[in-house]
């Protein structure tokens, strides 16, 4: 990776030398550092204060054994992580991911991204992320519960409502948050807002479940309106994934006048030219915890195709990748561009590879990066924290209206920052710069521990 600034080059080379095997983390760091070239050039204080080398190093990494007993009475062992990356502007905040692909590199990339995303929301939350290589797929409720209890037994020593507030991510939904919260309460004898994404009967916020998908569509709508005088109305939309983010992105895109024609999971994708019937998807994924393949068995005219990557060959106007990192590569980007896509907005974290992003940008496709476009989830989590502190619950409409306002503000913060630093229209650079400025300022103000 080559940088114009000698300072950025030195920091990146050092990072690579120390973390050579952490490819996802290096990918995320390289993207942010590249965007910061003009900022570093215009602000010598950043180098004087060592801000860049400090911001790429987590404040704390916790790695731990999670042992639990399966239904057959066998002992199982997984590895747990919590990366407390940056607390300059608030308590660490970020989700927990349960997926076999979880490694320290994946959690560090997610935690690093979270710093800038949380800053962009305008709310007082620092960056963190955690999880485990445990796979909830195919496990019974009892097994998931015992895993979550064991995981929280260690994690509880490191988190707290004013220290670190985890939430859901891949593999962690309402069921898992409930088990984690219950165990924290048992261990600490404290009823506190230590987790977000809680159930509505015990401190959860209305609209948190919908927030990331809805927020993604609010951001996309603002981007279309401001940069192309356009909207979702009458557009064909392809959304990857079929989990929390994908489901509620489908709902909002449809409400805004778009037609969503495809969804996927890690095995394959479904194409429904008549428009996805969301009640069928919700029944399969949220109630039965089944596979997306079953959609094609239940809905006439829908097709199922093995292999999730093929979803990007479907002709569409708007593409919303909402599954996982690096799911959309150059070949997929080329197919989307050849089919006339006008906007791509990221619901998942870092779903597009760097060469795919470059392809969209050089082809004039509007591109909304994850750390801005999917910030609605964490923003609403911060609203859940506010409600917990006040011991109040706001209505769905109140939370949804705040979410829409936050997403519009995030879009404009990214757009304006890009313009200010001479890269008008580049929302990747704009998001990185706008997110960075506030955190850097707080880090400088708080000094360095000698
Ligand atoms: P879910 O677990 O609810 O759903 C994940 C979806 O992505 C599933 O359809 C899953 O399919 C698919 N998927 C997961 N891993 C892979 C893979 N390796 N290859 C292909 N498909 C895969 O997670 P969420 O919807 O919550 O999260 C999706 C993305 O959005 C993640 O990147 C997450 O970090 C990001 N995000 C989530 C937020 C939230 O509030 N939930 C907030 C901000 C970002 P399968 O069932 O086959 O595994």
Image (tube, grey):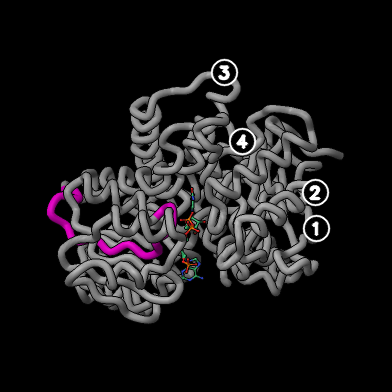
Quarter of the image where one finds residue 275: bottom left
Residue at disc 2, CB closer than 8 Å to ligand 1: no
On screen, residue 129 versus residue 317, left or right, reads right
Q: Position of residue 144 (x, y in %)?
A: 64, 57
Residue beneath label 4, please? 441
Between residue 367 and residue 39, name the one nearer to us.
367
Main secondary structure of the magenta stretch: loop
Q: Position of residue 102 (x, y in %)?
A: 64, 66
Question: How many residues crowd mark 1 within 10 Å: few (<14), some (14–19), many (20+)?
Answer: some
Residue beneath label 2, please? 154
Q: Earlier in the sequence, mark 1 or mark 3?
A: 1
Q: Earlier in the sequence, mark 2 or mark 1?
A: 1
Q: How far separated are the C-alphas under marks 2 and 1?
A: 7 Å
Instruction: Pick out the residue farthest to the left.
Output: 234
Q: Earlier in the sequence, mark 2 or mark 3?
A: 2
Would you say the residues marked 2 and 1 are in contact, meaning their CB atoms lie under 8 Å apart? yes
Residue pictured at 59% horizontal, 67% vertical: 24
- Please tell me whether mark 3 sits on a helix, a strand or a loop: helix
Residue beneath label 3, please? 390
Q: Earlier in the sequence, mark 2 or mark 4?
A: 2
Which quarter of the rendering shows the N terminus? Answer: bottom right
């Amino acid at each position: 990776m080559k940088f114009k600034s000698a300072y950025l080059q030195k920091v990146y080379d050092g990072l690579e030398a120390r973390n050579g095997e952490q490819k996802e983390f290096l990918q995320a760091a390289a993207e942010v550092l590249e965007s910061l070239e003009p900022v570093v050039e215009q602000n010598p204080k950043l180098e004087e204060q060592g801000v860049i080398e400090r911001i790429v190093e987590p404040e704390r990494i916790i790695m731990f054994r999670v042992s639990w007993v399966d239904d057959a009475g066998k002992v199982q062992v997984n590895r747990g992580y919590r990366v407390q990356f940056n607390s300059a502007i608030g308590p660490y905040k970020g989700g927990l991911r349960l997926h076999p692909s979880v490694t320290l590199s994946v959690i560090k990339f997610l935690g690093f991204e979270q710093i800038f995303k949380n800053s962009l929301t305008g709310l007082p939350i620092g960056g963190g992320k955690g999880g485990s290589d445990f796979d909830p797929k195919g496990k019974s409720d009892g097994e998931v519960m015992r895993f979550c209890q064991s995981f929280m037994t260690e994690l509880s020593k490191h988190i707290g409502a004013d220290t670190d507030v985890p939430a859901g991510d891949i593999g962690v939904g309402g069921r898992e948050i409930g088990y984690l919260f219950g165990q924290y309460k048992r261990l600490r004898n404290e009823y506190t807002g230590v987790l977000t994404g809680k159930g509505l009967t015990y401190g959860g916020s209305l609209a948190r479940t919908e927030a990331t998908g809805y927020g993604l569509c609010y951001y996309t709508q603002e981007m279309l309106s401001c940069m192309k005088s356009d909207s979702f109305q009458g557009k064909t939309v392809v959304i990857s994934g079929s989990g929390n983010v994908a489901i509620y992105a489908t709902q909002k895109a449809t409400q805004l006048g778009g037609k969503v024609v495809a969804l996927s999971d890690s095995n394959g994708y479904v194409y429904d030219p008549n428009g996805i019937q969301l009640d069928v998807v919700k029944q399969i994924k949220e109630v039965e915890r089944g596979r997306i393949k079953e959609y094609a068995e239940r809905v006439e005219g829908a097709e199922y195709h093995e292999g999730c990557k093929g979803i990007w060959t479907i002709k569409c106007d708007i593409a919303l990748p909402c599954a996982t990192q690096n799911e959309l590569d150059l070949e997929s980007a080329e197919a989307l561009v050849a089919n006339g896509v006008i906007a791509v907005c990221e619901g998942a974290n870092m779903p597009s590879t760097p060469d795919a992003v470059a392809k969209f940008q050089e082809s004039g496709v509007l591109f909304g990066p994850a750390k801005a476009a999917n910030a609605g989830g964490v923003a609403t989590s911060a609203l859940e924290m506010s409600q917990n502190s006040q011991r109040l619950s706001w209505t769905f409409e109140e939370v949804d209206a705040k979410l829409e306002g936050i997403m519009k503000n995030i879009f404009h913060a990214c757009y304006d920052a890009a313009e200010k630093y001479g890269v008008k229209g580049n929302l990747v650079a704009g998001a990185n710069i706008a997110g960075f400025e506030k955190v850097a300022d707080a880090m400088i103000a708080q000094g360095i521990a000698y």
